[in-house]
Amino acid sequence: MRFTSLVIELIRARPRLVVWIVVLLQAALWLLVPLVFYRSPPGDLAIVLAFGREYQVGTDLGPPLAFWLADIAFRAAGNHMFGVYVLAQICSVATFWTLYHLARTIVGGQQAVLAVLLTMTITAFGSPGVEFSPAVLARPLWVLLLLHSWQLIGQNRRNVWFAWSIEAGLLLLTTSAGIVLLMLVAGFAVATERGRRTLLSLDPLFALLVIVVLALPYLIWVIRADALGVPPLPAVAELGTRALNWVWLLVGLLLAVSGMLLLVALNSGWFGSKTEEAPIIYRPPVEPLAANFVYFFAIAPALAGSLISGLFGLDHVVGGSAVALLMSGLAMIVATGDLIQLRRQRILRSIWAAAVVAPALSVIAVSLFQPWTGNGEVATSLPATAIARFFGDNFERRTNQRLRAVTGDPQLASLIALDTGRPHLLLEATPERTPWLTFARFKETGGVVVWRASDTAGTPPAELALRFPGLVPEVPRAFEWLVTGREPLLRIGWAIVRPKTP
């Protein structure tokens, strides 16, 4: 008698339940890890919140939607990072749930579960998803756009044009790569007969109108800021270096899907006995247009994003690795065939669980053990709340006014900008990036200038002393890390610029 595990039976009988269970468990994992092991926001999240606090139509970081939503979530949680972490996991859940719906329309519900499970092993959906950013918000918008694009092209459902146009407009308001992604969708539509037939109506014109209305404020900002256009092409002598950069980006994408490739390889017939009776997950045949749709959007975003990044010398794939690899799991399922045999189920389950949990374990290990190796500080171990509270309270006690602005070291200043009073951030080395606050305005309203102290006197760096003549440093303040280890205490030099106006 053939034995079939409970997991296989659940995939066959309750595919939606399986998707909800694994997706919510992963979201809970990546919500718990930063709450327990992060004392400061990861990556550039503090900068994102500082920019979002200003509600600018556009900045040098790109379109504004992600920054606005981050600030709203931060305020809704009582100026706590919990709100932003929840927002990031909402984007993750929405991404996988929409991917399941897209996969179900192509390969059926049972194999759609396998597509979601494979996609979850991609490392780009692990710890990078905690750092809410335009790339994180672009994930659910991109997969929604693909779902409705397939419904328009493959299923001729004209009633989704309005939803498609809203998603396209929001994608343009989220990431600068939105125009590239929309061009890929348009290119696939033009290249296929059913796609061209879909475009031969008035619906695309109305959709284009909605997109323009949504993106118009940002487009006006781009024109006024003279940011319209592309960076200059590299010189011929630099092409070799740029090509090598592109190759390394492709290698990074391959490493990100290594867990998925390992699962597919172990489940193939290359290993084990030929007579093994493995349970089968069945699907109806996939039509050629659907297979081409999946393969195109599994390959084209990765190639286009990495090529553009390599050409212009960027250190990341345009649009984000998760967006580029979003359809790779479904592409693997489509390529496998109508009948998928699940061999060596225990090994597959163990490897899948390891691939999903390993990024979280690596984050925990770095947070707890790297300070003991002395190989550099862990950025998420900075005591952000204590730093912000100390400087906010000291400024208010000395001036009888709340802290309105902060500048100096960008990392430290952005953490202080998370204080309950939400002071404005001035990037003193690149003030054009923070046009909402000038040096003259900073000296009027007053604020705190911070830097990393290199001596016990707290002598400010020469460039800060030049920009703020007469700066009187205070006694440096020392803060403890989450895990001290071999790292010395974090010493912050600081000075108060007293307000000129009451």
Image (spheres, rainbow, N blue to C red):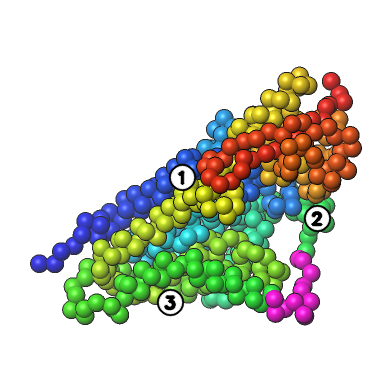
Vertically, is 246 above or below 165?
Answer: below
Mark 1 or 2: the one toward you: 1
Counting residues from the start of the chain, the first of labels 3 and 1 encountered is: 1
Q: Residue furthest left?
A: 1
Tell me if residue 346 can be seen: yes
Q: Position of residue 327 (x, y in %)?
A: 47, 65
Q: Label 2 is placed on what type of residue?
A: Ile
What's the distance in space between the residues labelled 3 and 2, CA to CA?
Answer: 42 Å
Q: Is residue 233 magenta?
A: yes
Badge number at residue 33? 1
Which residue in the protein does label 3 denote? 288
Disc 3 to disc 2: CB gap under 8 Å:
no
Q: Quadrant of residue 473?
A: top right
Q: Which residues are magenta?
A: 230-241
Q: Label 1 is placed on what type of residue?
A: Val
Counting residues from the start of the chain, the first of labels 1 and 2 encountered is: 1
- What is the tally of numbered marks visible in this picture? 3
Q: Secondary structure at mark 1?
A: helix
